[in-house]
């Protein structure tokens, strides 16, 4: 599903290239997401998860662009059940795909800041192995959004470093085995490289 969304975004951006008079920017790098301790984050084990965030932005003019973003976070834990003594391995993954406007302020030739609001969906998966050969596996998809911004520092004509990007992240409520998990919020920190073309 995520692959189809990325391909769709790529096709849209290619055909809309004529409208992006200021070119494109691709970014990618490390990401850390801290989601509140609710049923939704417990489902995926992603309270304090490391991962990757990548985006592609088509710039319509100097201050307005359209961004497509894909991020992936994962967390694994091993614990011993106090009652049975079994060692339990739990793995959680979260993949998000979001789109929306980005607003940029170019302070000078070297420094620029940006803010964005992106909406889309999040695929959450959880697997557990209790050591007996029985595996538990759950996957759900729901609404998600991020709002935030960051700072880019140009280090070469077409390359910039993004030392900080901070986003407020919201995961909508999903239903797991007939039960509503409730929505949850958190913060995401990202840093990486930006390539302009």
Image (cartoon, helix red, strand yellow):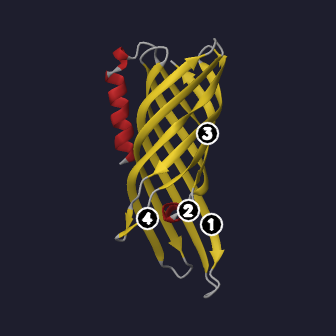
Q: Nearer the viewer, mark 3 or mark 1?
A: 3
First reached walking from the N terminus: tag 4 or tag 1? 1
CA distance separating discs 2 and 4: 14 Å
- Classed neighbour count for the residue bearing mark 1: other residues with Cα under 10 Å, few (<14), some (14–19), many (≥20): few
Disc 4 target residue: 181
CA distance separating discs 2 and 3: 19 Å
Residues 131 and 111: in front is 111
CA distance separating discs 3 and 1: 23 Å
User: For this view, does 158 lie left or right of residue 119?
Assistant: right
Contact, mark 1 vs mark 2 (Cβ under 8 Å): yes
Disc 1 target residue: 77
First reached walking from the N terminus: tag 4 or tag 3? 4
Q: Position of residue 100 (x, y in %)?
A: 41, 33
Q: Nearer the viewer, mark 4 or mark 3?
A: 4
Contact, mark 4 vs mark 1 (Cβ under 8 Å): no
Q: Is residue 86 above or below residue 75?
A: below
First reached walking from the N terminus: tag 2 or tag 3? 2
Disc 3 target residue: 190
- Classed neighbour count for the residue bearing mark 2: other residues with Cα under 10 Å, few (<14), some (14–19), many (≥20): many
Give the structural element (helix, strand or loop) at label 2.
loop
Q: Position of residue 95 (x, y in %)?
A: 47, 50
First reached walking from the N terminus: tag 2 or tag 4? 2
Q: Nearer the viewer, mark 1 or mark 2?
A: 2
* Numbered badge on residue 171: none
Contact, mark 2 vs mark 3 (Cβ under 8 Å): no
Q: Answer with the quarter of the image where residue 4 lies.
A: top left
Q: Answer with the quarter of the image where residue 19 lies.
A: top left
């Amino acid at each position: 599903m995520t692959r189809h969304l990325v391909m769709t975004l790529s096709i849209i951006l290619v055909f809309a290239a004529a409208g992006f008079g200021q070119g494109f920017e691709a970014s990618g790098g490390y990401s850390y997401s801290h989601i509140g301790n609710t049923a939704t984050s417990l489902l995926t084990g992603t309270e304090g998860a490391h991962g990757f965030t990548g985006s592609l932005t088509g710039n319509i003019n100097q201050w307005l662009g359209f961004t497509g973003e894909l991020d992936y976070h994962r967390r694994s834990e091993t614990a011993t059940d106090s009652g049975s003594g079994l060692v339990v391995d739990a793995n959680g993954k979260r993949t998000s795909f979001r789109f929306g406007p980005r607003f940029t302020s170019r302070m000078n030739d070297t420094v620029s800041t940006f803010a964005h609001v992106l909406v889309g969906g999040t695929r959450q998966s959880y697997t557990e192995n209790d050591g007996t050969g029985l595996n538990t596996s759950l996957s759900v998809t729901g609404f998600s959004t991020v709002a935030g911004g960051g700072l880019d520092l140009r280090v070469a004509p077409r390359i910039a470093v993004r030392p900080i990007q901070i986003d407020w992240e919201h995961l909508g409520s999903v239903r797991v085995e007939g039960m509503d998990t409730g929505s949850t919020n958190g913060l995401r920190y990202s840093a990486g490289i930006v390539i302009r073309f």
